[in-house]
Image (spheres, rainbow, N blue to C red):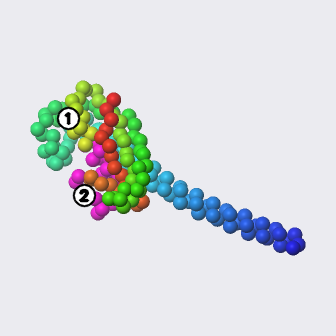
Amino acid sequence: MDDKGQITMEFLFLLSLMIIIIICTVNYVFQENEINMALNAAESGALEGAVVDSVSVYTINEYSQINSNKQLTHPKTVKIINISYVFIGNDSSLNKPTIRIQVTASSNEKLSEIEKAKMSQKINTRVRRSIVYAFHNEDSTDVGNYYQCYSDNYAYLTNDVIWV
């Protein structure tokens, strides 16, 4: 081979290698972007859940669930400290790779375990609802309760809020 043929082969080799790297990188970037969008939606939902509880404004369903416990209807300050996630692998019942979201919060009042559980439920419902609306997947969940939420490629679950 002459020098021109070798340069052409090297160029084609480098070009094909760059295309392979770009394809692999783009896939990874899209997946990470989807998870980041879900975490931003989760943060927004958790803050909404904390604020709604702080001013004691509820939907009719939430109010009927907490009406028996009058302590929960008094305004209080709830602060979201951290939101983290763990990839837990493929869940056969959800048919998607699953990510578990964990919210850590604190309150200005001493709360009983029942109050913490109720507030945790409200915050997690808002987290899941926010993810559903961020990805426009209202048709693939039970709107109102939001027990399951999905993005395009993942399913999201929530743990009970950790209170510190």
Position of residue 32 measured from the top left corner of the image (x, y, whole percent): 49, 53
Name the side, left or right, on which 55 lies relative to 47: left
Q: Residue at x 68, y 63 (%)?
A: 17
Residue extending farthest left: 68
Q: Is residue 73 visible?
A: yes
Which residues fall within the magenta stretch? 122-145
Name the side, left or right, on which 34 lies relative to 45: right
Work out which quarter of the rendered image holds the C terminus and state it. Answer: top left
* Badge 2 amino acid: Asp
Say which residue label 2 marks: 142
What predominant SS class does the magenta segment belong to? helix
Give whichever of 163, 81 is nearer the camera: 163
Which of the 4 image quadrants contains residue 80?
top left
Q: Is residue 92 magenta?
A: no
Say which residue label 1 marks: 114
Element class at badge 2: loop
Name the side, left or right, on which 18 lies relative to 87: right
Tag 2 near tag 1, CB within 8 Å = no
Position of residue 89 measured from the top left corner of the image (x, y, whole percent): 42, 53
Q: Is residue 151 visible?
A: no
Tell me the tag on residue 34.
Answer: none
Q: Is residue 141 magenta?
A: yes
